[in-house]
Amino acid sequence: MRLAVNNVSVEVAEAAADTTLLQYLRSQQNLMGTKEGCASGDCGACTVLVGRRSADTLVYSTVNACICPLGSLRDCHIVTVEGLSAGAETLHPVQAAMVECNGSQCGFCTPGFVVSLAGLQLAGGTELADADIAVQRAAVIDAISGNLCRCTGYRPIIDAGLSSLKKPACVASFVQNWVPDAPLTGTAAELASSGHRNLSDGVSNYRQPDTEAALQRLLGEYPEARLVAGGTDLMLEVTQQYKTLAQLIDLNRIESLSTIHIANDEIVLGAAASYSAIEKALHKISPEFVALLARLGSRQIRNRGTLGGNICNASPIADAPPYLLVMDAELEILNSKGDSRRELLTHFYRDYKKTTLGADEYLARIRIARAQLARPLKLFKITKRYEDDISAVMGAFCWSGKATNEFKIAFGGMAAIPKRAGATEQFLSNANWYVTGDVDEDILAQACDLLRSEFSPLSDVRASAAYRMVMACNLLKKACYEFAAEASGKVIEERLFNHA
Amino acid sequence: MRRIVVNSELSPAVNKGTAIGGVGHSIAHESAHKHVRGTAEYVDDLPLLPGTLFVATGQSSKPHARIRALDLSAVKSAPGVIDVIVQSDIPGKVDVAPVYSGDPLLAGDLVEFIGQPIFAVAATSFAAAQRAALLAKIDYEELPAQLTVEDSLAAQSFVLPQHQLLLGEPDANIESAPHQLSGEIYVRGQEHFYLEGQISEARLTEDGGIHVISSSQHPTEIQKLVAEVLAIPLHLVIAEVRRMGGGFGGKESQAAPLACIAALFAQRNRRPVRYRMPRRDDMIQTGKRHDFLNRWKAGFDANGKLLGVDMLLAGKCGFSPDLSEGIVDRAMFHADNSYFLNNARILGLRCKTHTVSNTAFRGFGGPKGMMAIETLLEDIARALGKDPLDIRKANLYCEGSDETPYGQKIEQHVLPVLIERLEKSSGYRARRIAITEFNSTHRTLKKGIALTPVKFGISFTAKHLNQAGALLQIYTDGSLLINHGGTEMGQGLYTKIQQIVASAFGVSVSRVMVSSTRTDKVPNTSPTAASSGTDLNGMAAKDACDKIKADLICFACDHFQITAEQIHFNNDVVVLGDQELDFPAFIKLAYLNRVALSATGHYRTPKIFYDRAAAKGQPFLYFANGAAVSEITLDCLTGEYKVERVDILHDVGKSLNPAIDIGQIEGGFIQGMGWLTTEELLWDEKGRIISNSPANYKIPTAFDVPEIFNVELFDEPNLENTIHLSKAVGEPPLMLAISVWAALRDACSSITNYQFSPRLDTPATPERVYWALQECVAFNKAAATERKS
């Protein structure tokens, strides 16, 4: 398998299917600037830039090398902290700004921050350079949302990010130097003729099909294989539990699985579309969901993690399912023979970590009706930490408006599966909870009683059962207050955070 | 030759030259360029020597048990495994405790916490070692386990005897006071979460000794323990530390077991050994900041002035003493924070629990003691209907009211002035009014504000540790190499030492190289801890500089027939009467004239002592001071909150490097904020730590940093003769974050119209804040009922 690292094209002759990019960089490439802080994608010390072919150019995004399967990087260009500066003397503008702003203390997290901020500069370009300070600050914080620093308190790092944003032209000259010594761009056919192969083709333990048909064949051929898209959860089995993933089938190169199609009547999200891609595509159509995504994982995680992974992993504390449940999202599922079936997400979850997905099936696409998307929606996520934290409770509330008064409610963190609150929905849909710009507190209290009868959450490291229960009720109230205020044209003042 | 003693008071011009980047300048961290390029080397970045083995440990799954049978056959036959050791394989001393005994390198028949290492595996790869370590079959006979402070108090089971401070007559004065209050708070510990996990590499030397390269704050202890475990003399062991990827106290005693196990495997197998703990093991197997249960009873007058305080501080030490003697002592020494208690009893207990042995963490007990008094003063303010700031100010140490419960008198009264300045610069009073107005017009959102001070004693409470050494070498090209006993963990110690040496010779900092801390260069070092790194090692480095300078001046007087007053070291030039020589040329000349160009320096802190039997003394040379104002907004429906603005004014004496000092203040503050807000250490009912990964233990991210974050230095020289009259800065700023917790409590209290202070244990997660709000709601209901009846 071929890829390029800091401009130099390399051929990976053989490696286990579950080899991570970090292991490869440190042990095969001797690139020690990329650090392991946690091996679980939580600290960002291993952040690198991955350039992927898009049309005829390479588009770079930051990823956590510690949980990124090496095999997924065929024909990609990896830029590590060592690759950012030009020669021994010249620092990349981000590196220079980090020195000037005293952005490093112990220095262990520093390469990760440098790479994250370099990625932001590259993506932001002159548009971000010209943006106002609030936009820039938000962008910097977003870019380093997956980077932990225990020494500095971040203030100088944020300053370094802001000051480096003013030097986009300078960055461009750095990127022009990023020309791998062998072509990584071109059509699939061109790449094929220039010798692109899967990792360990001889052993065929990491397969990266280009089409759904090929995927279906592989599913039949390797019934024991695990599917991997972002790998942001799966790879933890390797790095945290020291398990072996002997056979992997990677979904990243199948265009039909990562396409986001926005039609007049529905949107169709490829199951392997990354969160970052969804954020870009849906920011006008579903701003509430996009705002929630800003709190799902970190920028690095969202660059790799996929919506399909979030659904199929079937975690009761996944963030997207409550939203998709109130959207009445429909799943398009195929099997190894190419047979297709559709199922409402509401019916997909059977029990804790159990779904209706058969052994030879895969989730291909998620469909949401535009009519659903148009309805008022509230998404609230309760965590200990605002960014990159797993929900204690995640609440999704959708209301069709006072005329039709159809209420939909779903929660994460409240049951063994992401779950709709059917009885409460029905009660509110038939009750006059909305009274000219405000809520009827008695009716809301009854709705909360019902909610308590529908759920019996657990106590764990994230929250107590009692807090979860009272939060479910309070989030419902919060949603009702906001729906009521908006329905009468009032501005919502009492929000701590602008989103989710 | 005559010997000239260089004395800063007599001849400042001689002693301190102008140096580019010298003392007082905000130069960047000496490794900053290497940090940003990724070329700064940490232990795991060193090239692997051929045949290197990797280590993992087999861990107890019971909190307290006897091991009936240990079957390691599957471990030994696992792929890649080269060697497996248990306690009986240790040739020398089994106990690797830093002060008192109780920390076996590998458990023998008895295990005392979940995660305790029972055996260790060396294998040809990291993963092979990890996988093999899971294959042991262990038969346990479970014993009753005490898992909480309450369990320990009920059993009266402690790792060390209790200690008590007594000032005046607390009981009588509490009794006779116009007002009394009692209270309790549970303050949870903290995981260090240094970004670089624990790691050591051991290499054999040709003499049968060991060269250990470690991420440790205490190389001398590594050297000593490795020698003891291997039963070899100390001169056969070299411990080396170039830098750590963060320490925060977590690598003071906790780094040693890794070094010892790696060394033991290296000795047994005659191969290099690298032992790196994966993050999860690090979070399970290494000690953390102590939990503390604090209880108090106090008497005060109508103005809120304390008349007497009786306080209990019970630290959760875990299964062994480790450093808990000093930690609980320091909690006791800081239970007064900045306030005159008048009459006080402070009792410190060191609770034994069957959990990992807790250890040093920035502040070393100090933060826990301060939480008690800060809670108490707020409760007094609410009881009297006053602003907590006024109660805090009313109780500050001042002339006449200056005796601490341990008998030391406060001599430099920084805080009254400092607080006054911060109160004005932060607009505290106007913001207090605006916040009250905001709260009265908002249903869901409430704001809170608080100003809290910090007074932190500087010196090790273990007297013998207050010493340091340095080795300065000047080469014939005029370049200088300084070694000292301190370690670099990001705090900027090496940079400050570089500046101190550069200033001593009036040369640019670029002429001065600071290299790895090695026990074969500077012996018998103290841990880099207690904020003392620069105070001690800076003075030792300066002592070495002064010695060489004295010889150089002596030589120049003879050679150029001038007096010492005619010699100046400035801007890389040596002025010698009416002629000048470049520094390198002067050094070359000195060399040709056979002047010694290397010297060792030493420093011991004067004045300090502590009589443990009497519980009186002067444990600290001086105090570092500071104060912070924090403002928060919280959501009453959920308990979620946001820190909106922070203003800090902090006393570092005369700053050696303002940029580095401000970095310590900001970083310490945010780390302290994490401790008090989002970072929650939790164990399940079986004694298993469930906050065992960054996925469920949340340190602050950039988003959590207040957008308005003003930090200023209170630029007044130390009255004590410290290195260039600076003050230590490592730990004190952490406790400035108590203002965030106090602001949260203030916002909760607002819904009772500031009549009631709810209990708010820490960390004040959104959940805890929510329950505190519910306590306020209950208070309001009870008050309404009372009014009706």
Image (cartoon, coloured by chain):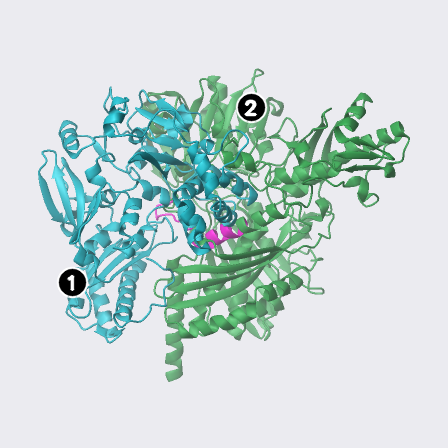
Chain colours: A cyan, B green
User: Position of B73 compared to B668: left or right?
Assistant: left
Residue under label 1, please give it: A423
* Disc 1: CA contacts within 10 A as few (<14), some (14-19) or many (>=20): some
> For numbered disc 2, what is the local secondary structure?
strand
Q: Is residue B543 visible?
A: yes
Amino acid at dot 2: His
The residue stretch that appears in magenta: B668-689
- According to the image, label 2 marks what residue? B211
Chain for numbered disc 2: B
In the rendered structure, does residue B674 fall within the stretch colored magenta?
yes
Give the total number of marks visible in the rendering: 2
Compared with residue B417, is residue B383 higher up or lower down, i.e. above or below? below
Q: B234 or B169: which is nearer to us?
A: B234
Q: Which mark is residue A343?
A: none
Marks 2 and 1 share the same chain: no
How far from the left and from the top, in percent, is residue A300?
36, 42
Element marked by disc 1: helix
**Where does the image place residue B102, in percent across and percent down from the top left?**
51, 37
Assign the C terminus of chain B to one quadrant of the image: bottom left
Disc 1 marks a residue whose amino acid type is Ala
Outermost residue, top side? B206
Q: On the picture, is B10 further left or further right than B418?
A: right
Whether residue A234 is in magenta: the answer is no
Near-viewer residue (A88 or A354):
A88
Classify residue A477 by image quadrant.
bottom left
